[in-house]
């Protein structure tokens, strides 16, 4: 009798993004703290501000640039009904994933700026 194969569970993309963002946010905070304690206060402040602005601009770019591909590529004459396959999805995951990745990074950089500025 063959051994049963375990079912693979796949984590959702927003959860993976949140874990990745949390790791990067904690890493940002730790690097800023290490620079601050080493006496490089200006470099620490500049690094935290750069990381904060990078995360915020990346989130804004992802949210504003998230346009469904079907709407960009559709070439349907005016006055004709769209087939159901061409309808845009009800939920676009790009802004959600960008928010899940960027929010912990912004929180880590913001906490570093707030504590060490």
Image: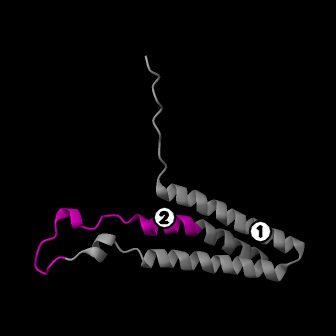
| Chain-order first, disc 2 or disc 1 | 1
Q: Position of residue 90 (x, y in %)?
A: 30, 64
Asked which secondary structure carries label 1, the reply is helix
Asked which secondary structure carries label 2, the reply is helix
Q: Quadrant of the C terminus?
A: bottom right
In depth, the one of 89 and 37 nearer the eye is 89
Q: Position of residue 64 (x, y in %)?
A: 43, 79
Q: Position of residue 53 (x, y in %)?
A: 62, 80
Task: Report which residue position mark 2 lands on.
Answer: 97
In depth, the one of 86 and 54 nearer the eye is 86
Q: Which residues are magenta?
A: 76-103
Figure quadrant of residue 103: bottom right
Figure quadrant of residue 77: bottom left
Task: Report which residue position mark 1 lands on.
Answer: 31
Q: Residues within 10 Å of mark 1 (few under 14, many from 20)?
A: some
Q: Is residue 39 left or right of residue 1?
A: right
Q: For residue 117, say whether it is visible.
A: no
Q: Residue at x 65, y 64 (%)?
A: 24
Q: Residue at x 18, y 63 (%)?
A: 84
């Amino acid at each position: 009798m063959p051994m049963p194969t375990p079912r693979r569970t796949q984590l959702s993309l927003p959860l993976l993004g949140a874990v990745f963002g949390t790791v990067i946010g904690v890493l940002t905070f730790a690097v800023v703290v290490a620079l601050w304690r080493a006496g490089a206060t200006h470099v620490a402040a500049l690094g935290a501000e750069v990381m904060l602005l990078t995360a915020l601009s990346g989130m804004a770019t992802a949210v504003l640039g998230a346009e469904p591909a079907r709407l960009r590529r559709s070439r349907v004459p005016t006055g004709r009904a769209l087939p159901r396959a061409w309808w845009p999805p009800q939920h676009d995951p790009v802004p959600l994933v960008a928010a899940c990745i960027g929010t912990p990074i912004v929180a880590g950089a913001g906490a570093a700026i707030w504590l060490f500025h």
